[in-house]
Image: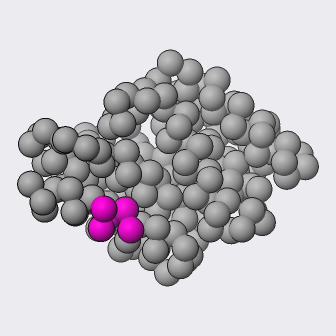
Amino acid sequence: MLQPIRLVSEAAEFAAHRHNGMARKGRGSEPYINHLAEVANLLALATDGADAELVAAGWLHDTVEDTDTTREELAQKFSERVAALAVEVTDDMSLSKKKRRQKQIEDAPHKSPDAKMIKIADKISNTRARIGPNLSSDECEDLAAYVIWAEKVVAGCRGVNPILDAEFDEAVKAAKSVFEGK
C-alpha cells in the first residue's frame, strides 16, 4: 500500500494522463483535470484530509467511465477500495443519457457512504462549472435542468457528510440566483 501522500499524488498524475486533452462542459471548456481536482479537494475538505483513499478515488472517479482504464488496473495500482469506489460511481455508458440520469437517482440511496460523498462532490463541481456571468438562455436552461436533476441524486446521498451537504446547498443557491434571475 502506498503512503497517503503518494497515493493521492499518483492518483492525480494517473487521472491527468488518462484525461489528457479532455475538456469539461462549462467554464469555457477548461481542462477536465480541473473537475477531478475540485472533486478530490472537496473530499479532502470533507474528511479534513484524513482519508487518502477517498481523495484518490475522487481523482479517479471518472477514469473507468471516460477512458480505457479498468477496475483491475486501479486495484493493482492503487488499492481495492479505490478501485471499488471508482467503479461504484461509474455510469453505464451503454445507456442513454436519460436512463443514466434516472439510474443515478434510483441508485443513490443504495450507494456506500463513501460513494455518496463522491457523488455529492461531483454534483457540486458540475453545478459550479455551469455558473457563470452572462449566461445565454440555453446555458441558463441547462443549469436549471442540471440543478433539478442533481438535487434528486443528492437527496439520496445526504446525511453522510455535513460539509458536503452545505457545499452542495451553496452551489444550488448560487445556481438558482443565476437562472431564477433571468
Q: How far from the left and from the top, in percent, is residue 150?
A: 31, 60
Q: Examine the rendered structure and indicate whether residue 157 appears above or below residue 35.
A: below
Q: Is residue 168 above or below residue 79?
A: below
**Residue 72 seen in render:** no
* Of residues 26 and 79, the one drawn nearer to the viewer in this rendering: 26
Residue drawn at x 20%, y 56% is 178
Horizontal and vertical percent position of residue 135: 18, 41
The residues colored magenta run 170-174
Q: Quadrant of the C terminus?
A: bottom left
Q: Which residue occupies the extreme front position in the image?
A: 133
Please tell me which residue is depicted at 19% across the width and 41% down the height of the picture. 134
Q: How many marks?
A: 0
Q: Relative to 24, is 97 on the left or the right?
A: left
Q: Residue at x 78, y 66 (%)?
A: 50
Q: Is residue 9 visible?
A: yes
Magenta-colored segment: predominant secondary structure: helix
Query: Residue 14 falls in which quadrant of the image?
Result: top right
Pinpoint residue 61: horizontal percent, then vertical percent. 56, 45
Q: Residue at x 13, y 39 (%)?
A: 136
Colour option used: one colour
In this rendered view, identify the residue nearer to me: 128 or 64: 128
The one nearer the camera, 120 or 81, is: 120
Question: Picture coordinates of residue 44 (x, y %)?
Answer: 67, 59
Instruction: Let me know if residue 156 is in the magenta part.
Output: no
Apparent side of residue 113 relative to residue 172 in the rendered image (left or right): right
